[in-house]
Image (tube, grey):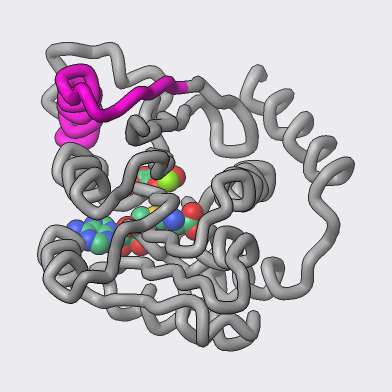
Amino acid sequence: MADQLWARIDDYLVDALVPPDRVLDHTLRAGVDAGIPQIQVTPTQGKLLYLLALAVGARKILEVGTLAGYSAIWMARALPPDGRLITLEVDSDNARVARASIRRAGLEDRIEVRLGPALETLPALEAEGAGPFDFVFVDADKENNPGYVAWALRLSRPGTVIVVDNIVRHGALIDAASDDASVRGVRAMFELIASEPRIEATALQTVGSKGHDGIAILRVKS
Ligand code: SAH
Ligand code: DHB
Ligand code: MG
């Protein structure tokens, strides 16, 4: 019941605040047609990422977890013409579908999809001096969240903002005895954040068309 209300309110908010967009609609449809799971951020969340990237004046954005490219396209729209977004994806089918939608969006010169397990492509980014990134969105396999946040920090500068998706998982977050690797990963990430003096962070629960979940927002101290 509550879930239905949350979804209807999301519909209202999207109607009110997120204009119809052929490129983003096509990106979603391409994902459906390719049989990719529909787990991308919602339109209002995509717009939040876009607004946060704009607010920090991001010129370099890093994403961990591309899926079909929906959130990457939202964030890349906040970049100046010479800005860059690198998005990391382990699944070659997802990467292929994402690249096609990125090309269709006219963003192929701003977005690069890197194929491979992120814990292997992140060190490569450091080795080639790709950072520091101004804005990072962590949204891949949740069990590796501690590693992703540690890498985001290594590839950051003072003032970098890091957003982590799916921190509540329908409430599973607070089960300290959970043997779910995702829950353990999110909880270990919060322990890492708490012990990391260079990060200030908060987190918000969210409800909407994807049910009950949440995001963490981290900022690297100046
Ligand atoms: N950010 C996307 C949704 C990402 S879903 C959006 O909102 O539009 C999570 C993605 O992370 C999936 O595409 C999955 O294949 C990818 N993923 C899972 N494990 C990964 C890993 N080890 N390295 C890189 N990507 C991974
Ligand atoms: C899942 C992953 C996500 O990134 C998300 O936003 C929702 C669900 C999942 O793996 O189930
Ligand atoms: Mg997510």
Please give the name of the residue rendered at 44% of the width and 68% of the height, measured from the top-left corner: 85
Is residue 93 in the magenta section?
Answer: no
Residue 197 in sight in this render: yes
Q: Measuring 77% from the left and 30% from the top, which residue is drawn there?
A: 9
Nearer to us in this view, 213 or 147: 147
Is 81 placed above or below 194 here? below
The residue at the point 44 percent across, 22 percent down is: 203
Magenta-colored segment: predominant secondary structure = helix
* Direction from residue 124 to residue 4 in the image, left or right: right
Percent x, y for residue 143? 18, 41
Quarter of the figure that contains the C terminus: top left
Reply above or below: 65 against 195: below
Q: Is residue 123 above or below residue 8?
A: below
Pinpoint residue 150: horizontal percent, then vertical percent: 17, 42
Q: Which residues are magenta?
A: 181-203
Of residues 77 and 54, the one nearer the viewer is: 54
The residue lying toward the viewer, choosing from 148 and 21, is 148
- Residue drawn at x 17%, y 12% as measured from the top left: 176
Q: Position of residue 182 (x, y in %)?
A: 22, 36
Picture quadrant where residue 119 is located: bottom left
